[in-house]
Image (tube, rainbow, N blue to C red):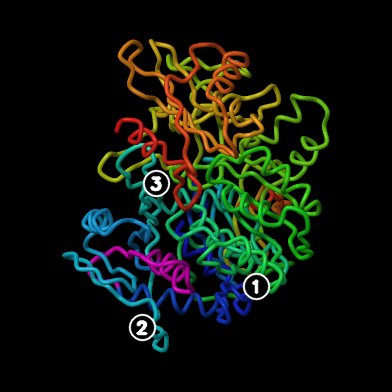
Amino acid sequence: MAQIYKPGVKLSSRVCKTQIMVLRIPAVELEIFCGGSPMEVGDPVALKELQGENNGTLVGKRYTDESETMEFLCTRGGEGSISISGYKIGIKAAKKLPSSD
Amino acid sequence: MNIYLILQMAVEAMGEREAVKLNDYSITFSELNNMSKSVASLVKNKEKIGFLSENNLLMPAALFGAAIAGVEFVPLNYRLSKEQLNMQLKRISPAILFTDEDIMVEGIRTIGTNTLTFDDIIEIGYHSDDEAVAVELFTSGTTGEPKSAVLKHKNLMAYILGTVEFMSAEEEESVLLSVPPYHIAGIAAVLSSSYSGRKIVQLPNFSAQAWTELVIQEKITNAFLVPTMLKRIVEQYSEDLSLPSLKNVAYGGGKMPRSVIERAMKLLPNVNFTNAYGLTETSATICMLGPEDHRSAFNSSDILIKRRLSSVGRPIPSIELIIKDDEGKICLSEELGNVWVRGEQVSGEYKGIGSKLDSEGWFPTKDRGFLDNDGYLFIDGRADDIIVRGGENISPGEIEDVVRAHPMVEDVAAVAVKDTEWGEAVGLVIVAKCHINDREIIELIKRKLRSSRVPSIIKYMDELPYNETGKLLRRVIRDNFAD
């Protein structure tokens, strides 16, 4: 079900081990999928079957839409891919700062 | 977001990588995770976790263990007097205290740093309250009573997510950590190294020789140093120092003399130097002068670019920074004023005092500084150290810079001294390489600055009082003049 998400919220996949953390998100109703099934707020639930084409998620990668209106941090990787209707979600290129400590 | 997430992700992606090493002992991220859970399981009734010891393998486990248990991690300064320490312990009671010292304070339960065993690993749920305090740090109190700064999980996570890419370190990378656990840089290092997957090699007792030997022996790639440490290294190895594994050195925690960084760049031409400016209250770094900035400043003949070796660089992308005058008006470039910062990593909150942020979220750092035309920040000193002579504000930094350039001056500090005519006047303490005539110093200041900057008293000392992380203790110098 579409809903408004807040930064800091943890979402779990219903088809694989994937977990993501919302870092930035517009205040509009969204439906966030992983592996073709809507993601669940909080900890993982019983797993269903993977649907559609999936490239998987990678822990530590940041995912964003084309115009970077939202950003998710993958805190646990899995086989499903993240998708949101109306947006194209992909891995955000890393901007590396020099290490400072 | 709880800082324990950092360790969870590290375990998931690189659990068998070495996380921390001290002497011949090392632990992986998985082992660190188990240790952290054991630490968390010790906590009863919301006791805080105090840590009174030099760096050891338990330190990162105590930091993450406190996060799992949802209580504050409070590292304490083991160089404090018994009296000062007991006062701080009373302020954090009730707490578990990891220490090998004899401590008798009500509500403080001591546990030896070598007595823990990690055989029984308990599965333990963890707290994930964004507003919860992760770390409580007593500020160094160079200008007064130490305040207790609180850093929330959300502040520290914002710092890590804003500055570090997950698992960006190669497997063979390691960072030599020689700052103590009670320094913000010591905390930040644990978090950012765990997130980037870089092994921490601990050096509890810094000396230039021990440091260089360990760099060679452990093939260290990265290091963080406070200015005093880098100064000792370049002094001891003035000609010949070969550290082929060393790629990146970050420094911060105090003013870096330009002569020291220039010597270091000559001595170690292949090392990337980064100046990291930050405060305890801002969860470490807020400005950086990166390796490219260092090289272009070092090689430039343009005086405005060259002087950037004395700047602390530009704000990191997740931080906003402005300079305001005492009336709150925004300063133009080159105009000296008060440094204000804003960003999610900025806490600006003290225990028992509350938040120092203004209504729009800006934090007054109490540092004085100015920006150049390209936004590079130059720090002049602490607002509290300003000398007010007959209503005129004099910053110690400008006098010190002029006097330090004298070839016979090793070190110098200017402080406010009581003056019957002006209220305050300039007191100068000089560490001289050989005898200097007061006249010479006075003439130098008159020529380069103006007569109001001329000291009313000049004293000579064998060395200036610095704390162990390289901060000049101006309070001690002021007390010395008052006697």
Q: Is residue A54 visible?
A: no
Left or right, B468 with respect to B160, comes to left
Residue displayed at 59% across by 62% down? B193
Give the residue type that dot 1 points to: Leu
Residue that mark 1 sits on: A50
Give the residue type that dot 3 points to: Ser
Given residues A79 and B79, the one toward you in this image is: B79
| Chain ID, mark 1 | A
Marks 3 & 2, CB-CB < 8 Å contact: no
Left or right, B187 with respect to B70, comes to right
Relative height, residue B477 to residue B92 (above, below): above
Q: Where is residue B412 drawn, in percent x and y?
A: 53, 34
| Chain ID, mark 2 | B
Residue that mark 2 sits on: B115
Left or right, B24 with respect to B258, comes to left
Bin the neighbour count of mark 3 within 10 Å (Cα to Cα): few under 14, some 14-19, many 20 and up: some
Bin the neighbour count of mark 2 within 10 Å (Cα to Cα): few under 14, some 14-19, many 20 and up: few
Residue that mark 3 sits on: B140
Residue displayed at 30% across by 68% down? B97
Q: State which region is magenta.
A: B43-67
Query: Which residue, as the protein is rendered here, is positioned at the far bottom?
Result: B119
Given residues B240 and B301, the one toward you in this image is: B240
Give the residue type that dot 2 points to: Thr
**Would you identify the image quadrant in which residue B64 lies?**
bottom left
SS at badge 2: loop
* Labels 3, 2: one chain: yes
Circle nearer the viewer, 3 or 2: 3
Q: Where is residue B334 drawn, in percent x and y?
A: 62, 19
Give the spatial CA distance, label 3 vs label 1.
Answer: 55 Å
Residue displayed at 49% across by 23% down? B395
Relative height, residue A83 to residue B12 (above, below): above
Give the spatial CA distance, label 3 vs label 2.
Answer: 30 Å
